[in-house]
Image (cartoon, grey):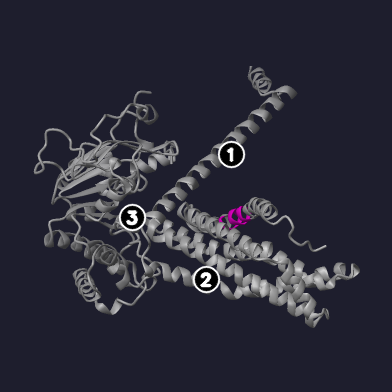
Amino acid sequence: MAGSPENHLNRTPPVSPSNGVDRPAGRTTSDRPLIEVQDLWLVFEGHPVLRRISLQVHRGLTLAIIGESGCGKTVLLKTLIGLIRPSSGKVYFDGMDLSRLSEKELTRQRRRFGFLFQQAALFDSMTVYQNVAFPLRQHTAKNEEEIREIVLARLAEVGLSPKILDKHPAELSGGMRKRVGLARALVLEPEVMLYDEPTTGLDPIMSDVINELILETRRRRPVTSIVVTHDMRTAQKTADRVVMLYPLARLQSDEPQILYDGPPDGIEQSPDIRVRDFVRGEAEQRLLEIRTGQSEE
Amino acid sequence: MAASANSSVIRRRRNPTWAEAVGQYVADWITDLGAMIVQALTEWGSFSLFCLRTCRWLLFRLPKWETIIPNFYQIGVRSLPVIALTGAFIGMVMAVQSYTQFRMLNMETRLGAVINMALVRELGPVLAATMLAGRVGSAMAAQLGTMRITEQIDALAVMGTNPIHYLVVPRFWACLVLIPMLTLMADFMGIVGGTFYSICFLGIDFHHYVQNSRDFVGLFDLFAGVLKSCFFGAAIALIACHRGFHCDPGAEGVGRAATTAFVASFVTILLLDLILGITLEAINVTLWPEAPKII
C-alpha cells in the first residue's frame, strides 16, 4: 500500500528553515509563484479528501478550481488560507510556509486575502454597513467618516445602493448577500481574492453579474484570484487557468486527483472522458456507475 | 447436489457456542469502552487547548469596548430580573420548609440563620450559576454554533480577526465579572424573601430573627459564595463557547451544542461546588475554630 494516505503520512517531512519565511530554493521573488501547494494530503477522520495536490498560482492571474460536489475544492481553498491544516505537504504564500507561521503571524498574513464564502457568511447580528466596515474598524485607525466613504465606494463598486446600509443580511436576496460579501472582502484592498462557489444558488443573470464583478475586480486592482466553482460558465469566463479535481472515492489509488490543469479553452478537448463529461454536463457514465452500484458514495 | 450444498451452507452458519457468544460480547464491550475513552480524551484535549488559547488572549490583549458592552448587557442586565425572582422565591420556600422542624425545637427565631447561611454559601452562588448556565450558556453555545455552521467564525479568521479574542474573551470577562454581582443579588433577594415570609406569614419576631442571622453569617461566608461564583462563571463561559466553536453541522448540531453546554456546565458547577465547599470549609474551620454554631 505504498500509495495509501496513511502510509504517506508516516513519512518524515522534509526539513525546512524555522523562521517561517521558507522560500523554495533557486527562485527569485519575481518568478516565484504567490501561492504554491506542494504534495498536499488531507485526511479527515481516516477518510482521505485530498491526495498529492501540487499547484502554483502566479501573481495577477486567476485560477479556477472545478470539480463535482464533494471532491474537496472548498477544503483545498480553506487549506490555502490556513483555515484547515493539511495532514502533510506544504502551502506557501509569498514564500512563507503557512504551517510554520505563528497564530499571530498567520492572522496578520490573512489580511492580505479576501474571501467570498459560498453563503457570503455575513454577520447576521450586524447591518450591511457594519459588515462591510468591520475589517476597517478592526485593522485600521480610520475615523468614522473615512470608513463610511470607503464602505459606500465598495458597495457602489459591486452595484449596491446606500439604501441597504441599515438592512440586516436576513433581509437581502442571495445575490445581494453575495455582493455585500464581495464588498466586505475587498474593503482592505487584498492581494489575493478567494471565491468559494460565487454563483451557486443564483439565477443565470445574477450569476453573470457576479462573474462580471470578479472580472471588474481584477481590472481595477492587481489581484490574484482563485475561484472554486462547479459552474463552467464562471470558470471559462473568469479564469486564466483551470484545475479540475476528482473525488478520491472514485479514483484508483495510483491516479492523480487533478484530472486537468491548463487553459480554459483546452478543457473541452481533454483526452479524459471524465473531464469532458463534467464540462458538457453529461451524466451517462455517472448514472451507469450508480445503476451498477460501483459508486462508493 | 443442490440440497447438499444448502446443507453445507447451513452447517457453516451454525449458532455460536456459549463461550464464543460471551467472548464476542466481551470483545464488543471492550471495543465500545475503548472508543468512549478515546472520545472522552479527545474532547478533554480539545477543551484544554481551547482554555489555553483563551487564557493566552486574556493575558495578551483586552477586547474592544464595543464587544464587551453588549455581552455585559446581555449577561448581566438581562439576567438580573430572573435571578432576583429566583432568589426571592428560594428564600421564601426555605422559610416554609424549615419552619416546622425549627418550631418543634422551639428555635424558630434561628430560621434566619439557616436560611441566610444556606443562601449565602450555597444556594445563592449555585442558583445564580445554574440560571446563568441555562439562560446565557445555552444561548452562547447556540449563537456561536450557528456562527460556526454558517462560516461566520471562518469569516472572522480570514479577515485577520482572531475568533477566540473577538468572540470568547468578551463573553468570558462578562461571565467572570458579572456572576459575583448576580450572586450577591440572588443572596440579597433570598434574604429579603426569607425575612419577609418569616416575619409576615410565620409571625417570627423580627428583632430575634435579624439578631440570629447577623450572628451566624459572617463576611467569610459571603466571600466564600462570591469566590465560588467566579469559578462557576469562568466554567460556564469556557464550556459554552467551546461547545459552540465545535458545533456539529445542521439544526440538530446547534440544538445539541446548546443542550450539552447546559448539562456540562451544570455538572461542572456541582463538581466545583463540592470541591470548593470542602476547601473553603477547611479554611474556615482552621481560621475560626470557635465560630458560633446554629444548634
Left or right side of A5 for A53: left
Instruction: Determine the CA span between mark 2 and mark 3.
Output: 28 Å
Q: Is residue B103 visible?
A: yes
User: Tag 3: residue type?
Assistant: Ala
Pointer 2 residue: B76
Asked whether the residues under marks 1 and 3 belong to the same chain, the reply is yes
Secondary element at image label 3: helix
Residue at far front of view: B290
Task: Give yes or no for residue A292 being in the magenta stretch.
Answer: no
Residue B157 is marked as 3
Residue B117 sits in which quadrant? bottom right
Mark 3 is surrounded, within 10 Å at the Cα level, by few (under 14), some (14 to 19) or many (20 or more) other residues, namely many
Q: Quadrant of the N terminus of chain A?
A: top left
In the image, residue B134 lies at what x, y percent?
A: 59, 63
Q: Chain of mark 3?
A: B
For the residues carrying marks 2 and 1, which lies nearer the camera in this image? 2
The residue nearer to you, when weighing A41 against A256, is A41
User: Tag 2: residue type?
Assistant: Gly
Asked if A133 appears above or below B18 in the picture, the reply is below
In the image, residue B19 lies at what x, y percent?
A: 73, 22
Pointer 1 residue: B36
User: Tag 1: residue type?
Assistant: Met
Among numbered discs 1 and 3, the one appearing first in the sequence: 1
Instruction: Determine the CA span between mark 1 and mark 3.
Output: 32 Å
What residue range appears in magenta?
A: B261-269
Secondary element at image label 1: helix
Residue at far right of view: B104
The residue nearer to you, when weighing B260 against B228, is B228
